[in-house]
Amino acid sequence: MNPDGLPAQYWAGARVLVLSPTPTHPQDYGNRRRIFEICRRLTAEGARITFVHYAAEHEWRGDVPRGAGSAERAMALAWWQYHTIAPTRIVHANAIGHHHKIDEWWDPAIESFLTWLFKTRSFEVFVVNYSWLSKALEFAPPSLLKILDTHDKLSGRRDVLDSLGIRPEFFHTTEAEEKIALDRADLVWAIKDQERVAFQRMTATPVLTMSHMEPFNAIPRPEPDPDGYLRVGIIGARNNVNLINITRFLKVAEPVFRETFAPIKIVIAGSVCSLLSDLNYPFVELRGPVENVEDFYRSVDCVAIPIELSTGLKIKAAEAISFGVPVVSTAHAFEGLPVCGSLQNLADLTQLARALADLAFAPRTELEMAAAESQSTHSHAIAEIEKTFRKTADLAVSRRRIIVLAVDSRAFCPDSVFNLVLTSTYERLRKLATVVILVVAGSAEDVVANPSIIGRFERIVVGTEVAHAQHLSGQLDTMAVDVQPTGIFLQVNRPKAVIADALNSAMFLEHCPHTEIVTRPELIAFSEDSANFKAPVAAYRRTYAVAPAHSQEMVARATATGIELPTEPYILRLSPNMFPHKYGSEKRVALLGSPWAPAMPVAVRMAQSWGMKPFVIFGVNENAPSKWGNVSCIRANAFASRILKGTEMPPKFAVDLSAGAPGLPLCREILERLRVPTLSVLQTGPHTAEDFDLLPLAASTYGDLWHAFRSFALEPDETHERNFASVWHELESRSDWTWLRRYSKQILEAGDVC
């Protein structure tokens, strides 16, 4: 647990998009290991990484490199999703002017791919590697936390190369151009404090130091050299900065070693050896590229980092530290890492050479002390990285535009009312925010059994309280469905709003008291097969109950508890054509209401007297028999389920006697969506008092009811369709769900709620 009581996995379930011009596999270069380690850490803390590789490196951009197939397979296995973008322009070109413009290497292929990706998938965090790719941040939706991982300070880089006598290479730019890149981000990661300070002078964007350190893997120290030499390792990639720094060091070290008679052997490994073939020092051994870097570190007594001038963090220093190897380094080469010993902070190459000479004559205990200092450096560096991850996670959470749809597991069952309402809600809200489907009731078996429905939604979480959730967690994970305790999910993710079609006990605890909750009583009553449920009023800042119509009992409860009662339909669309032969020869009429209501026997007799076959749909809180006299009775949730599955034909007509009893307003909405002419008795249904008198059929007296049945019986279908066209049009025109959509936009735009 962290200091605030949150679990360590505060990235759990987060969708993170990473764009990189270098692959994460194989990890044979320092920048690859850094990017891999960032992604590995996010994955370990619960994030799902979509890794997009823009194939810009030399061995990728001209042709598919040898071994690329295995590298791509490794990346596909390591990350949740993996994509490659092929370059459509010359990459790593020389600057057109004295310096590169910040977007000089931009490739329109990246824009096309990102435009498609953001339209089809949702993310919460977007990490772009290197400032020269920062234009990618401009294509991200505003709801994302946009992070620029700089890796290096690119302004001033040409001056460093000039001072080393190296022709300008790779990307170099001005502070004004680099500022453009930094300003595009919501957060900038600098690889060391010195660059963080420089970036903070350039931009108002927050800047954090995200150093690099791999997991600690102390390797056994080698036996002393039989000839008494101190074996000093230097390893580096093929580039001119390494070439110049190593040759400068050897030139300085040679007289020091000669004058002191120091028994030293400098073992140089890595692709840099191909640039050093002309060296002629008796104490230098060129080992060349190594297959396993760990074997190299096992073979040397210590590692030297002889760098006086460069940019960025020296990944090789961090690598040696992570293996627990004694490190002897210039202060410049150790920038960005915590200094825990004098051998890590030497002023220049001359001091480095003298320190190695002294170490060659020192007892072996000096090497052991230096190894302990490496371990201490590692611990301090990991602690600093942990702080940056935590600050980044806090910022990501505060920026998230999350709406949670809390549902019954039957929302994943096709042809169910739960699925119909979930799909309708998701379609309305998915463009406004990251919509997370949180299963809080039912059984995880419903989710596992319907993979095609899972694929329609971006992010699904199953609460551990749901039946079989933990038992099926492995299967759910393969389907990209997370399993978390409901309370912890709400606490960690701090959604702007929860729209609850189902409830569980964890939702009543004060996990996020500033989140607002919209309960939908009809669905909750269907989920619990009862309307006698409590609304989680105390646990949230504000509570709503939204339904097509509200009963007097709900109004009384709202008055007592402060629940607000907007009216809103539940279903986006329901095609009347799903029942091409829906009526048959019988004029069935559905009577919505309690069998015990005073008007119900009268309505039954009236319907029968006009040759109709009535049946009763009663609310979820009623306990009615399946037969009431010679009239069939069916509970509201059973009727909704059967009619959506096609096992129950819609009636010819309907009469609403429900007074908003739980379950019946949703049944009425389904019938009206199917264009069943529906009579309103008293002021019920999804219509206000103001438009009650305008309804084509409305009854407030038994006389009105009689005339309505007469109309049903005698008027042709075309007349009813014409009369009710305005009602059906009104309902369909409200498919934009004015209140819910407006409410969601307002709460998302109001800023942070937690």
Image: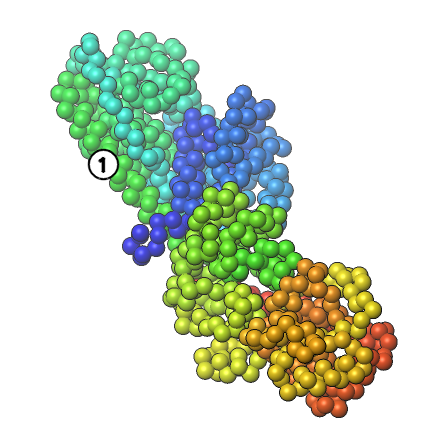
Q: Residue at x 38, y 33 (%)?
A: 311
Taking the image as shown, residue 526 lies to the left or right of residue 169, namely right
Query: Considering depth in this image, is 126 or 646 the residue closer to the camera?
Result: 646
Res. 155 visible in picture: no
Q: How many numbered badges does the structure rendering display?
A: 1
Q: Secondary structure at mark 1?
A: helix
Q: Position of residue 400 (x, y in %)?
A: 47, 56
Residue at (62, 38) in percent of width and height: 109
User: In the figure, residue 664 lies in which quadrant?
Assistant: bottom right
Kindly identify the residue that appears in the image at 57 percent across and 34 percent down.
Answer: 84
Q: Amino acid at mark 1?
A: Ser
Q: Tell me which residue sits at (43%, 42%) in the image.
A: 43
The C terminus is located in which quarter? Answer: bottom left
The residue that disc 1 covers is 376
* Residue 355 visible here: yes
Question: Percent from the top left, x then y, of residue 604?
Answer: 72, 82
Callout 1: few (<14), some (14-19), or many (20+) C-alpha neighbours within 10 Å?
some
Horizontal side of 237 relative to 98 (left or right) equals: left
- Which of these two is toward me, 7 or 61? 7
Q: Residue 731: where, in percent of width, then height? A: 70, 71
Residue 625 location in percent, x, y?
61, 74
From the viewer's perspective, tell me whether residue 13 is left or right of residue 706: left
Q: Which quadrant of the figure has residue 370?
A: top left
On screen, 133 above or below 697?
above
Task: Please name the colour scheme applied to the rendered image.
Answer: rainbow
**Residue 323 to residue 545: above or below:** above
